[in-house]
Amino acid sequence: MTINKSRNDNELLLAVEGRLETTTAPELETVIKSETDGITSLVLDFSKLEYISSAGLRALLMAQKIMNNQGAMKVTGANEIVTEIFEVTGFADILTIE
């Protein structure tokens, strides 16, 4: 998994590539925890994300909790597989997905 970071004022864009699963989710959690100070808008670009597991969903839930306290979070570019996982797990109702 690769995470490309781009910060513009109070917005942080994280473009995640590859597979977000048990072995890679801790890396995303670490980046989110260390990079979101002062951030009011977190955008997760999943256009190159191939798959997300329950560990990846847990990382998204953690990110959503952080951003609920300081701004907003949205997920963009999710493919059909990832979107279906969001729908089946109910995350489509929790997350802002574009």
Image (tube, rainbow, N blue to C red):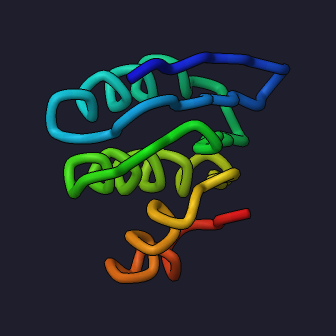
Q: Position of residue 92 (x, y in %)?
A: 51, 76
The answer to whether residue 66 is above or below residue 11 is below
- Indicate left or right for 75 with 29 as reference: right
The answer to whether residue 73 is above or below residue 8 is below
- Total numbered badges shown on the rendered structure: 0
Q: Residue at x 72, y 42 (%)?
A: 41
Point out the image quarter for the C terminus: bottom right
Front one among 69 and 92: 92
Q: Position of residue 71 (x, y in %)?
A: 67, 49
Q: Residue at x 34, y 51 (%)?
A: 52
Front one among 85 and 56: 85
The answer to whether residue 50 is above or below residue 28 is below
Q: Residue at x 38, y 23 (%)?
A: 1
Q: Quadrant of residue 5?
A: top right
Q: Quadrant of residue 79?
A: bottom right
- Indicate left or right for 7 with 61 as reference: right
Q: Position of residue 36 (x, y in %)?
A: 55, 27
Most distant residue in the right direction? 9
Q: Position of residue 31 (x, y in %)?
A: 42, 21
Q: Residue at x 21, y 57 (%)?
A: 54
